[in-house]
Image (tube, rainbow, N blue to C red):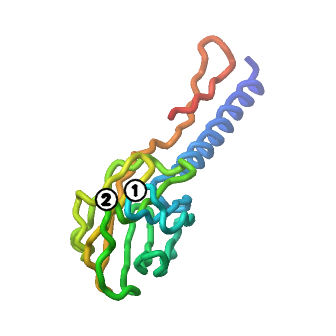
Amino acid sequence: MPVKNKMKKILVTIVFGVLLSILTVSISASTVTGFNGEVVRLTVDSPNLGEIIAGPHDAIVDSNIEFSLERVNNVVEVDINLSDKTIYFDYSRSSYGNFASGSFNGYVFTDINNTIPNITSVKIDTIATTLGVDDSRISYDNNQIFVNVASLSFNQDSRIKLNIGFESTSPKRLLWFPIKNQNEKVLIICM
């Protein structure tokens, strides 16, 4: 094989290697890890799950407060801030009282676009939480979180902080595999 052809083959291999590195980095960097940048829907249901008294409210999760609920239809004033892996309820704008009774009086958060990784856990941050919620009042499935505050007492110092676990998402990797005895390569995307 002449030297010129060998140099071309080496150059082509180097260019493919550089492109592969760029593609791998850009695909890996786009992996979703939690709420940030995604649309979440909030409804307030009472006195039963599915009986919506406020919402639906949709918000893109960013560094701002996503939901600021006012006292309408017996909804207690609350600011709800979502971060990548937490939900924080701040009742400092409310006065004091008791949430209405019922089988479910609370908040439902939904991944309406099915773009957030599956929810694998919801844990109460017991240090930051001052409202009387316990694990029996929190439930979830792959794309929804339910927070039941029925009959609990609240005041301006009431807070809830939930830590959310998500299914880990493996970055997609591009791999080149040479095919034996041929001058072709195969691009494979690994999930």
Q: Using the rendered view, name the quadrant where residue 126 is placed.
A: bottom left
Instruction: Give the position of the N terminus as an image quadrant.
Output: top right
| Image position, residue 170 (x, y; %) | 45, 42
* Residue drawn at point x = 51 percent, y = 75 percent: 64
Q: Mark 1 points at which residue?
A: 49
- At label 1, counting other C-alpha atoms closer than 10 Å, the crowd grade (few under 14, some 14-19, many 20 or more) is some
| Front residue (pair 44, 130) | 44
Q: Is 50 placed above or below 42 here?
A: above
Query: Whole-percent x and y of residue 44?
Result: 45, 66
Give the amino acid type for the residue marked by disc 2 in the picture. Answer: Ser
User: 153 above or below 6?
Assistant: below
Whether pointer 1 and pointer 2 mark residues with C-beta atoms closer than 8 Å, the reply is yes
> What residue sits 52% from the left and 65% below the top?
61
Rendered location of residue 58, percent (x, y):
56, 64
Q: Is 120 left, or right, of 59 in this rendering?
A: left
The residue at 54%/63% (across/down) is 56
| Three-letter amino acid code of the residue under disc 1 | Leu
Picture quadrant where residue 186 is located:
top right
Please tell me which residue lies in front, 39 or 37: 39
In the figure, 100 relative to 184: above or below?
A: below
- On screen, 168 above or below 38? above
Question: In the image, which disc is placed on residue 103?
Answer: 2
**Secondary structure type for disc 1:** loop
Q: How far apart are the alpha carbons under marks 1 and 2?
A: 7 Å
